[in-house]
Image: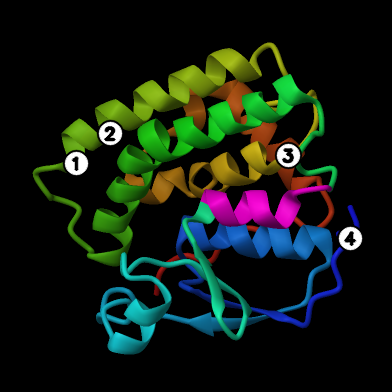
Amino acid sequence: MPHPSTHLPHRVFGTAASGNCHKVRLALDLLGIAYRWHEVDVVKGGTRTPAFLAMNPNGKVPVLQIDDHTFLAESNAILGYLADGTDLWPGDRLQRAQVLQWLFFEQYTHEPAIAVARYIRAFLKQPDDARLPALIKRGDAALAVMEQHLARQPFFAAGRFSIADIALFAYTHKADEGGFDLAAYPAVRAWLARCRAVPGVTDMPSPA
């Protein structure tokens, strides 16, 4: 999946145990793009410093530094930038839109439940947080949507691995750390195995 650009190494400001940041690492690794990783401790306020806010006023990781003056935030926007013109984002108009459909699903439906539950349990170490039951219910609903789709298709769009799969792999393969049981989702588990079989796909580290 070679990328046509020959930029100097990008810099990524992120948290290794964050799914949104792991997406960016996966895309860079899969495309063979050189980069330097700068770890940011979100729990200790690393995204609220003046230096970080100058790169992303929204105060969130990841941030991709493209050159001395250009910074790109929002994980799925970064995926689109990196994958443009490669096999990770199909060129067909409908297939590209279907990739976007799943990227929006991931950020609007999947991530706000599964990633937040994982953050509460794994980062904040609060397994009895009152928000968790509602998050588990919403996350299971998102997993059920994925299960229905993956029972019919090997990947999320274009019949092959794309940035839609990268986006959804990131938090799904660590969903157990948020309290989710994937035993009820055999198609999701089979899809995770197919993703892991793609050369360059690696698991995300767990929070310390």
Checking the image for residue 136, the label placed there is: 2
Q: Provide the secondary structure element on which disc 4 rests.
A: loop
Which of the numbered marks, if any, corresponds to residue 162? 3
User: Mark 2 falls on what kind of element?
Assistant: helix
Kind of residue at badge 2:
Ile
The label number, if any, that marks residue 11 in the structure image: none
Q: Residues within 10 Å of mark 4 (few under 14, many from 20)?
A: few
Colouring rule applied to residues = rainbow
Asked if the residue at tag 3 contacts the one at tag 2, i.e. Cβ–Cβ closer than 8 Å, the answer is no
Residue at numbered disc 4: 4
> Which residue is nearer to you in this view: 11 or 188?
11
- Crowding at mark 2 (Cα within 10 Å: few <14, some 14-19, many 20+): some
Residue 9 placement (x, y as % from top left): 74, 81
Give the spatial CA distance, label 2 vs label 3. 27 Å
Q: Give left or right: position of 55 versus 94.
A: left
Measured in 3D between alpha carbons, the distance from the residue under mark 2 to the one under mark 4, in whole angstroms, is 41 Å
Residue type at mark 3?
Answer: Ser
